[in-house]
Image (spheres, rainbow, N blue to C red):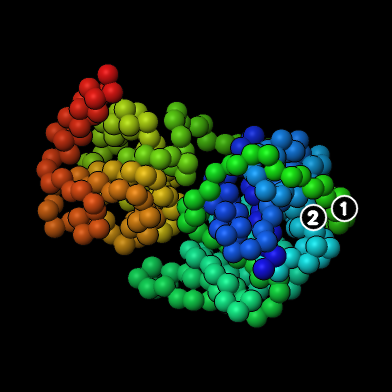
Amino acid sequence: MKALVFLEHHGDALSRASLGVLAKAQSLGDATGVVLGSGVRAVAESAGGVVWVADDARLDAPLPQPRVDVLAQLVRDEGFDAVLFAQSVLAADVAAGLAARLDAGLNWDLVEVEERDGALVGTRPALGDTVYVETSWSSRPALAVFRSGTFDGDAAGGAEVRDIPVALEEHSTLVELVEQQAEEAASGPSIEDADVIVAAGRGLGGPEGFGAVEALARELGGAVAATRAVVDAGWYPYSTQVGQTGKTVSPKLYVAIGISGAVQHKVGMQRSGTIVAINKDPHAPIFDFADLGVVGDLNEIVPKLTELVRARRS
């Protein structure tokens, strides 16, 4: 299999999710990455392996159609069997546009892929993530979007960079990005990149409870996350939501505070290395899959745990 992996970047860093997809593709066979943007050569070199680069001012804005033009031509010229993406807003738009341009099949929300007898076979959750089903492609190239956080990957550095000539269709230049706004970044790592996540649910009682959660996350050097119910209530930003309709994460340590453990949340964090649950309800579903469970009042436990971590670090 000859695969191309779309490596998304933010600022001067490649997304961890797309690096994970690249690592998975490389384990299957001949896989290269591709970075599209303006002033991105140094970013591409950080990936490791072989990386195609389209460095052009017309690719500076995060618009999908110019990227579809470049990728479609690259796939045709180099004869790639598959194009793989890590889930994101931009990747979703690019993958859909590329599928239409190449008249290719696109499988979505995959959590695994393998090669059998020269053909790709993917795995995706179904029925609310209660079962897993296998899916395949009837034509080449095979396009796939993987659930973010499914695979682990890091920038290896020293990539061999191959330049791509940029030729855009006239209609692809008609859209102009007038303004771009980003939510003010919180201190510490993002939940997608954090090795430690401290997450809170409705059991917190209200938004004022996040002060204790944030304090624990700071001591652990981690990020703060929340459940859908919490963000829907306006207690915490939507960008921190973990779960079926939020983000999928795979930290080394996941501390769940006041979270019941409904399946919709479980699917977003079940790949965590160690799961610690704090909940006053001894029958909460999260205790069924947590590695360590603490039954009690989180308002007493979380501050004491924070003190213990602080004392251990000092």
Residue 32 or residue 235, whichever sits in front? 32
Q: Is residue 160 left or right of residue 144?
A: right
Residue 174 or residue 43, whichever sits in front? 43
Which quadrant of the view contains residue 187? Answer: top left
Q: Residue at x 34, y 49 (%)?
A: 273
In the rendering, at what x and y percent does residue 258 appear?
23, 46
Amino acid type indicated by mark 2: Val
Is residue 207 visible in the rendered image? The answer is yes
Q: Residue at x 84, y 63 (%)?
A: 77
Which quadrant of the view contains residue 126? Answer: bottom left
Q: Any mark on residue 167, and which?
A: 1
Q: Is residue 210 left or right of residue 112?
A: left
Location of residue 294 with respect to 142 vertically, above or below: above
Q: Residue at x 58, y 51 (%)?
A: 18
Q: Any mark on residue 52, and which?
A: none
Around disc 1, counting alpha carbons within 10 Å, would you say few (fewer than 14), some (14 to 19), or many (20 or more)? few
Location of residue 87 with respect to 159 vertically, above or below: below
Is residue 199 visible in the rendered image? The answer is no
Amino acid type indicated by mark 1: Ala
In the rendering, at what x and y percent does residue 92 appear?
61, 58
C-alpha separation, residue under disc 2 versus residue under disc 1? 7 Å
Location of residue 53 with respect to 13 vertically, above or below: below
Q: Which residue is mark 2?
A: 70
- Which one is earlier in the sequence, the residue at label 2 or at label 1? 2
Residue at the farthest top position: 314
Around disc 2, counting alpha carbons within 10 Å, would you say few (fewer than 14), some (14 to 19), or many (20 or more)? many
In the rendering, at what x and y percent does residue 25 appear?
60, 60
Please, what secondary structure does the residue beneath circle 2 have?
helix
* Location of the N terminus (image quadrant): bottom right
